[in-house]
Amino acid sequence: MRVLSNAPGHYRFIEGIPAYSGGVVADGGHEVVHVTLQTGVPWRDGFAIVDAHLRAEGHERRALCAVQLRCPEPYTFGGFDEFNGEYRSLLDAWDVCVDGRNPVARSNVAPVANPPGVQCLYAFSYVRPAPDAAGPTFVVAGSGEYDEATGIHREGDTSAEAMRDKAAYVMRVMSARLEALGVGWAHVNRTNVYTAHTPNGLADAVLGGMGAARSHGLHLFDARPPIVGIEFEMDVRAVRAERHI
């Protein structure tokens, strides 16, 4: 994994794909702030809210470092690519990319109950100065049991054993991204799990690898990953400032 600097945004990021990065960590003297919307809004309207919030706080658009989205239902691969193209076009218009690379981390999941009617913005994160920041703050992007080279891990199998194996697979991805960012599970204070399948032992497959972060527990969302066939997704972060608007 290659970690690049987003100097104008005051954070570093794991190089990912055109639609999103693998994760971000604030530079020294800065911190990540996480903001959750009380009610999700259509994603383009959501970015207008992000823009207004950043301006009100005295920050440029390049301070944006992560977003969390909610979709009506999982996409096909083709549909996901189509949305990603629209999404990336907006980020290009915002001029937040670094030498053509997208620094903004992302999660995008489909709630099982009360799904939105359209693709929505649920939350976002940005970086602000914090001279007295106590420890690193970061966001690791959402990831499911999928690899571009090998496809979906144990595709079509949602047995209890397979789900535990999928969770272990995604935990390895989370751990690798944390290591790339120069942090570890001991720094994590929020772990999100997204799945519609919760067999016995699934939580243990995650908690067992979290180390000290286990004391903060898991936040389980009854939601599906954004692509049909993927069954388990996670994202993690460490922040000191959480806001709700």
Image (spheres, rainbow, N blue to C red):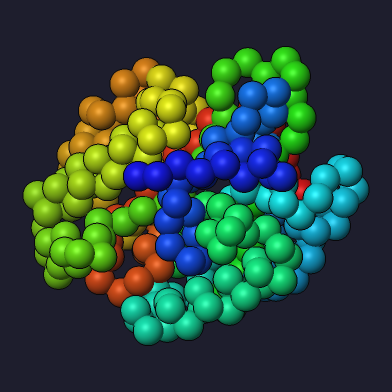
Locate residue 44, reporting x and y percent: 70, 73
Count how many numbered circles sit on residues in the image.
0
Image side of residue 171 versus residue 129, left or right:
left
Q: Is residue 152 left or right of residue 43?
A: left
Q: Nearer the viewer, residue 101 or 111?
A: 101
Q: Position of residue 204 (x, y in %)?
A: 22, 33
User: Visible in this render: residue 41?
Assistant: no
Residue 191 appears at what percent x and percent y?
Answer: 43, 37
- In-image side of 73 versus 139 (left or right): left
Residue 45: % across, % down: 75, 71
Q: Residue furthest front?
A: 99
- In the image, residue 120 above or below residue 58: below
- Residue at (20% x, 42% y) in the render: 168
> Residue visible at 39% across and 25% down?
184
Q: Is residue 70 above or below residue 201?
A: below
Q: Residue at 50% across / 74% down in the picture? A: 84
Say left or right for 89 vs 220.
Answer: right
What quarter of the picture does the N terminus occupy?
Answer: top left
Q: In percent of the image, x 74 and y 24: which residue is there? A: 130
Q: Is residue 146 visible?
A: yes
Residue placed most toward the observer, 102 or 114: 102
Q: Is residue 201 above or below residue 199?
A: above
